Amino acid sequence: MTRTLITNGTIIGADGRTAGDVLVDGETVAAILAPGQASALGITAAGSDVRTIDAAGKYVIPGGVDVHTHMQLPFGGTEASDTFETGTIAAAWGGVTTIVDFAVQKAGEDVIESLGAWHDKAAGNCAIDYGFHQIIGGVDENSLKAMTYLVDNEGITSFKLFMAYPGVFYADDGQILRAMQNAGESGAVIMMHAENGIAIDVLVAQSLARGDTDPRFHSLTRPAELEGEATNRAIQLAKVAGNVPLYIVHMSASEALEEVAEARHKGQNVFAETCPQYLYLSLEDHLAQPGFEGAKWVCSTPLRTKHEHHHADLWKGLRMNELAVVSTDHCPFCMKDQKELGVGNFSAIPNGIGGVEHRMELIYQGVVNGELSLERWVETCCTTPARMFGMYPKKGVIAPGADADIVVWDPNSTTRIGVNDKHHMNMDHSAYEGFEIDGKVDTVMSRGAVVMENDTFHGRAGHGQYVKRGLSQYLV
Ligand code: URP
Ligand code: ZN
Ligand code: ZN
């Protein structure tokens, strides 16, 4: 098997930075060597079998782990536009080496069959490694039994429930409590879409009846209070169920963050993620763009107003570990034929923003802007997502024995984001069109194979393997 030495770089981990070389042997990290040690051991000598990647002036970080993606998700009368192939290739371009996507069970469907359908979509098509969470869209005796089966046999240890989308994925409080009790027995994590969907549906109907149909009303009918209220309710239910691990997904509102912070300070097993769209994009500057343009930014939870302090609070929450993870909630839809389904009715616009290619860059910009340290960037985008969802230390860290999922990051280069700059996601627009980032993905290695280098993709669909996950390793 070929060996590779990534040399002269600064290795960044969640716990610090160090000058050193990373020796990769086959698919895993063999050793971290002090500067000069490799040549002393003859590893870089002419005639050795070692390929060298020079990372002088660059950072060497674990491959990104994006634990919230929706490839090929049937949703809103259409299907998310990235396949597992196009989406994972785009992810690799962006320095992501593992995704965890969501298999979907709807009410009345068999959970294990629905998981099989997601395996069929992904197997042989992914350019990087992938795992699954399971959405339970119908909590009943059968799905509860299946949850335990998935934890014990399938490497699926996290289940997403919805307090939003009545009639689609919605679970009522009793169903949520039962699913949480079940998760408590098996050690699984409950992931929650925390918005009060019943109240939102009333506001949506009233808005449409008034003739307020533009995309911006998507946010105005999903007020921050209803995210805060649902987050609080989920926290109380998880407590009643026996301090069951609860992970709030795609958090956008200060009100929700306050609830999580309070629960964490009380010692409850509550965690949360946010996404780049909630850190950078706003109701006024994006969703409220004239005409139908704002449809590009329709997602749930929605973009929040810039006139309150949601954006600053989320950055602070990331610094304070009230928010543990940054994921993308990558759920791409093209404007043409997809977002257009909601012309004249914002509630028919498919919900979702694509961003799997840009999370590492966008959060690195937070480092440049003084919001986060380099270590916290790696922690929130690589290490904690791996630990939270039972993939550590195979994923999320550069250490002997770990999978050689490695990104060489060039802090002295820049990235321009957008369709005009040829992004790789299967989308006819970008939510971040024209953004300029101070830093660039230079080289990406997935299980020892270089999949991106010199602005060229060298990977292949089918390289990515299914990751059977263990229980969360990140409980308070
Ligand atoms: O707008 C979003 N978030 N679409 C994807 C589905 C979900 O709720 O995560
Ligand atoms: Zn959701
Ligand atoms: Zn999602």
Image (cartoon, rainbow, N blue to C red):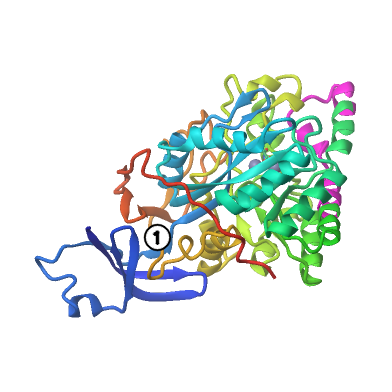
Image quadrant assignment for residue 93: top left
Q: Quadrant of ligand 2?
A: top right
Between 209 and 51, the residue placed more toward the observer is 51
Residue 436: x %, y % from top left? 49, 48
Give the side of residue 345 with respect to residue 147, left or right.
right
- Position of residue 109 relative to residue 279, above or below, is above
Is residue 476 visible in the rendered structure shown here? yes
Between 153 and 264, the residue placed more toward the observer is 153
In magenta stretch: residue 50: no
In magenta stretch: residue 231: yes
Residue 144: x %, y % from top left? 74, 45
Between 118 and 326, the residue placed more toward the observer is 118
Image quadrant assignment for residue 163: top right
Give the side of residue 302 with respect to residue 83, left or right.
right
Magenta stretch in the rendered image: 206-232
Residue 234: x %, y % from top left? 82, 53
Crowd band around label 1 with a 10 angstrom C-alpha radius: few (<14), some (14–19), many (20+): many
What's the amino acid at mark 1? Asp
